[in-house]
Image: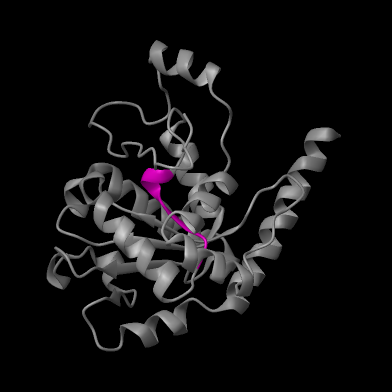
Amino acid sequence: MGIQKSKIDLCPVSLPLGKSHSVDTSQRHRESDSKKPEISLHDVAEHSSTTTMPTGEREAAEGVEELPEEDAEGEVFLKFVILHAESDTSEALRVQDLLQNDFGIRPGIIFAEMPCGRQHLQNLDDAVNGSAWTILLLTENFLRDTWCKFQFYSSLMNSVNRQHKYNSVIPMRPLNNPLPRERTPFALRTINALEEESRGFPTQVERIFQESVYKTQQTIWKETRNTVQRQLIA
């Protein structure tokens, strides 16, 4: 169930209609999960931060760039997660690389990098609440995937119900196969989307992904985790 250092273990994200999202009854998955170590978002973040850059550039960046700090359990609060259709995994990886290496917004992950063998709803909750921004990759494939529709509605409700998550959902139309504005769900049309083909894209990125917003969310995330841990111990 792990993501190896040398290769991303991509996990399918779409679910067939009429089947439960919360229960995995595959005996093969249970047997394989029992033999493999548990993987955390820190492992995924470490992988995404180190495998997308050449060795020389990575070593130079590590000497200058300050990566997000870990908590006591080695968990890292991520900068962003990209939610995408299963058929858009390669495009999501390209956008991840763009944000991390061209704009220095790291670490971030795509949903396909979440641990396999776990419930999709648990992965979605961990991804959205374990990162500062949720990017919805709006392509022609996005609305064809029922799971993607669930993802964006859940993300929007999360941003409404949690004050610190306000404005944390970012629709993005990538260069390749973007979803036309007129076909975009109304709920997403009310949010200013990142337009990669726009000349103002770099300015948009700089305005949205502010370090002060990240630090605020990171602090709340740590406090919430500590509260839950104390309750479990009590």
In the rendered view, would you say 151 is above or below 13? below
Point out residue 47 in the picture as x, y percentages from the top left corner: 50, 49
Q: Is-magenta flag for residue 107?
A: yes
Classify residue 63 as left or right of residue 18: right
Which residue extends farthest right? 234
Say how the picture is coloured: one colour
* Tally of marks: 0
Point out residue 216 in the picture as x, y percentages from the top left corner: 66, 71
In the rendered view, would you say 195 is above or below 4? below
Point out residue 1 in the picture as x, y percentages from the top left corner: 46, 29
Which residue extends farthest front? 56
**Residue shown at 59% from the left, 48% from the top:** 42
In the rendered view, would you say 232 is above or below 36? below
In the rendered view, would you say 194 is above or below 225? below
Along the line of sight, which residue is nearer the eye, 115 or 15?
115
Classify residue 14 as left or right of residue 210: left
**Residue shown at 17% from the left, 72% from the top:** 181
**Residue shown at 41% from the left, 36% from the top:** 120
Q: Which residues are magenta?
A: 106-113
